[in-house]
Image (cartoon, rainbow, N blue to C red):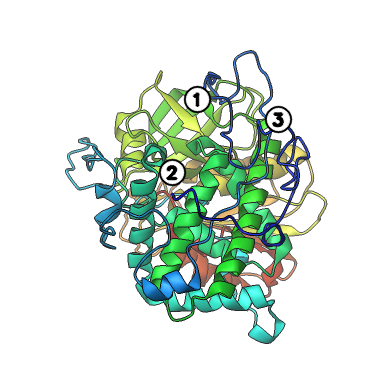
Amino acid sequence: MRNDRKTFKARQIMTTTSADNGASAADGGGNGEWSWFSPARKPDAPRGPQGERDGGEEIPSRPVTPIRRVGSGAERRAHPGGTGTHAPAEAPAPGAEAARAAAPGAERPQPPARAGTDAAPGPAEHQRAEDPATGPASAARPATPDRESSPDAVLIRRNLEEIEPVADSVTAYFYALLFVQHPQLRELFPASMDSQRDRLFRAVLTAGKLVDEPEILTEYLSHLGRGHRKYGTRPEHYPAVGECLLASLARYASTTWSDAAEEAWVRAYTTISQTMIDAAAEDEKHSPAWWDAEVVWHERRTSDIAVVTVRPDQPYPFRAGQHTMVETPWWPRVWRHYSFADAPRPDGLLSFHVKAVPAGWVSSALVHRARPGDVVRLGPPAGSMTVDHGSDAGLLCVGGGTGIAPIRALVEDVAEHGRSRPVEVFYGARRARELYDLETMRELERRHPWLSVRAVVSEDDSRPGDRPDGEPPLVGELPEVVSRYGPWASYDGYLSGPPGMIRSGVAAMQSVGVPAHRIRHDSLDELVARGE
């Protein structure tokens, strides 16, 4: 990066203070030790297992370093294909291979060789998910009309509309530029970028879309900031990402790009960075970046589904209905999302229902390779599909496949709170023999008179002896079967399962009277990426 390039003027930098030391852009954090361009910690300060200094000294947070301009308008007109940053002599080709080729030694890993499959790895593990790089449910709403938007939001959305048709090329160029100019960041990402390469870029773009919705934006970014601690993300990484973001936008949004648009993105990205840094710093005070958890029980329910129970190395606070990210020792830096299958237990153990899918790195490892004694890593809990215990409303719970895991946790949660409120569970699968947890749900039903469990299959090809509990299941698509019953106007809706089921399930619940604001599930963007 050229040393003679000026930073943005002070009026263009949002001087949000850090969570810890109160330093702002104006004072640079005192003596410069934690100033805008300084590293997150002294180079010789060793890191403990969770990122703290030896001796337990607290690591202060800092305001984010301002990103630099892509280049003056004159420079862009003279070099329309340039980035304005210290790009390589020949810009990396904006193709799918560019991001992988940018990092020396980043060879494509091979898939797990278990269970008789040799499928290539890829983004196909469909479990419960809320990826830090996907947007909240509200992000899917239509953009606010320009007449109601701020000038910055108008400029940002015009850029986004222009790059949408070439989003893959923009993403590949962004990562290639990031890894060429900042090769030290490559180690934060998995060896294969197939499923990861668009997540960070997509997260930033999602935040850009929400620039005029501060409450939603803050909640989304705070979650991202806390979640990114497990990746090793530090405050000094944000300027590099911001500069490569601006360079990518300048290259591919050339029609709508301007000095004003660039300044709008700088203001937006400064807010994004500061919010994430502050959330991470606050979280660092009371939570580790990740938890090590030992596998203590591994139960195969079917040929491709296992219940994996782990013991965290320290207390793990969560609520029934939430989920977490899991990293296995066989695939470092590859994290996948799984729901908790139980309400919090006195013994502190955590259980997950995992289905191995073709090309699923983490799911295949957890189902076919994990054994008691193995140690996995857990990210922080996330998700808002939780029970409101201050309400007397009934619960209408719909779980498809391994989506029954958080539904079971919700039932246990209601039971533990001791309030009698109706809970209606619809548990669906393609065939009766795939209802692997039906007997557990039936046992809960026998213990709790307020609970009703209905099994649903889309293809009833079973014989009576094949039925897990001897009772014939209802036949039909799960959301359609739910709509046959009711009325449900006085119920809160909970949905967990594949993205298609969630979409149709929301429509089915609304059609039988459940208000939209009382239907809880993770965003569809997150579900599309679940367990990739």
The foreground one among 201 and 71 is: 71
The foreground one among 374 and 296 is: 374
The foreground one among 235 and 394 is: 235
Q: Is residue 381 above or below residue 195?
A: above
Q: Is residue 244 above or below residue 304?
A: below
Nearer to us of marks 3 and 1 is: 3
Three-letter residue code for mark 1: Ala
Q: Quick check: marks 2 and 3 in contact, CB under 8 Å?
A: no
As drawn, the label of residue 293 is: 1
Three-letter residue code for mark 3: Lys
Q: Residues within 10 Å of mark 3 (few under 14, many from 20)?
A: few
- The percent position of residue 8, horizontal first and vertical second, equals 61, 59
Q: Secondary structure at mark 2?
A: strand
Gap in angstroms between the C-alphas marked 2 and 3: 25 Å
Q: Residue at x 38, y 61 (%)?
A: 171
As drawn, the label of residue 336 is: 2
In the picture of the structure, the residue carrying the numbered disc 3 is 285
Residue 69: tell me if it is visible.
Answer: yes
Q: Secondary structure at mark 3?
A: loop
Q: Quick check: marks 1 and 2 in contact, CB under 8 Å?
A: no
Gap in angstroms between the C-alphas marked 3 and 1: 21 Å
